[in-house]
Image (cartoon, rainbow, N blue to C red):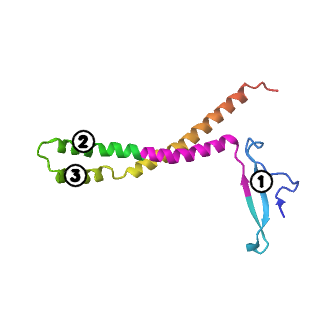
Amino acid sequence: MNLSIDPRGREATTGPNADKETFTWRWVPLDKNFGEPQLQYRFRLNGWQRIGIVLSVVWAALGGLWGNHIAIQQNGAVPIAHYKWCISHPNYDDDECSAAFDEEYAVGVRGHWASATMVALIPIPVAWLLVYIVVWAVRWMRRGLQPST
């Protein structure tokens, strides 16, 4: 049994683009609440928003891997250079060079996941904000160019 909040049986809409952003409120009886109805809502996304969500998830995964790779490359470059310098000497001790490398490399790449997380997550809200600003600005300019009636 579904009962709409609007007594006329219409869907409740909000926002300046009510025809595009539709929120449907329904009363749904649940057994665990002894038959008392509970308010639920459904949020509809347009195609561009769905594409944005998919791209955000893809960026979070691939951007995190890319950020991790860059952080390890940059922070591990000095220990690798020291190791190459150490083994280039004619009388080098392999155990000593390897031990020094292991210690320097561990210190150098510490925190690489924090860098990966920043590369993965910071661009997502920035990109969403920029896209919404551009969409708002284009709609605002279109409204200004329409002839008044």
Residue at 64 percent of width and 32 percent of height: 137
Residue at 76 percent of width and 72 percent of height: 31
Left/right placement of residue 146 relative to residue 9 reads left
Q: According to the image, label 1 marks what residue?
A: 24
Left/right placement of residue 80 relative to residue 141 reads left
Q: The N terminus appears in which quarter of the rendering?
A: bottom right
Task: Name the image quarter holding residue 70.
Answer: top left
Task: Name the image quarter holding residue 3.
Answer: bottom right
In the displayed structure, 147 sits above or below 81; it is: above
Q: According to the image, label 2 marks what residue?
A: 81
Left/right placement of residue 66 relative to residue 107 reads right
Residues at circles 3 and 2 in contact by the CB criterion of under 8 Å: no
In the displayed structure, 38 sits above or below 66; it is: below
- Mark 1 or mark 3: which comes first in sequence? 1
Measured from the top left, where is residue 113 in percent x and y? 41, 52
Q: Nearer the viewer, residue 144 or 78?
A: 78
- Mark 3 or mark 2: which comes first in sequence? 2
Q: According to the image, label 3 marks what residue?
A: 98
What amino acid is labelled 2 in the image? Ala
Q: Which residues are magenta?
A: 41-67
Secondary structure at badge 3 equals helix
Cα separation, mark 2 vs mark 1, equals: 61 Å
Cα separation, mark 3 vs mark 2, equals: 12 Å
What amino acid is labelled 1 in the image? Thr
- Mark 2 or mark 1: which comes first in sequence? 1
Measured from the top left, where is residue 149 in percent x and y? 82, 27
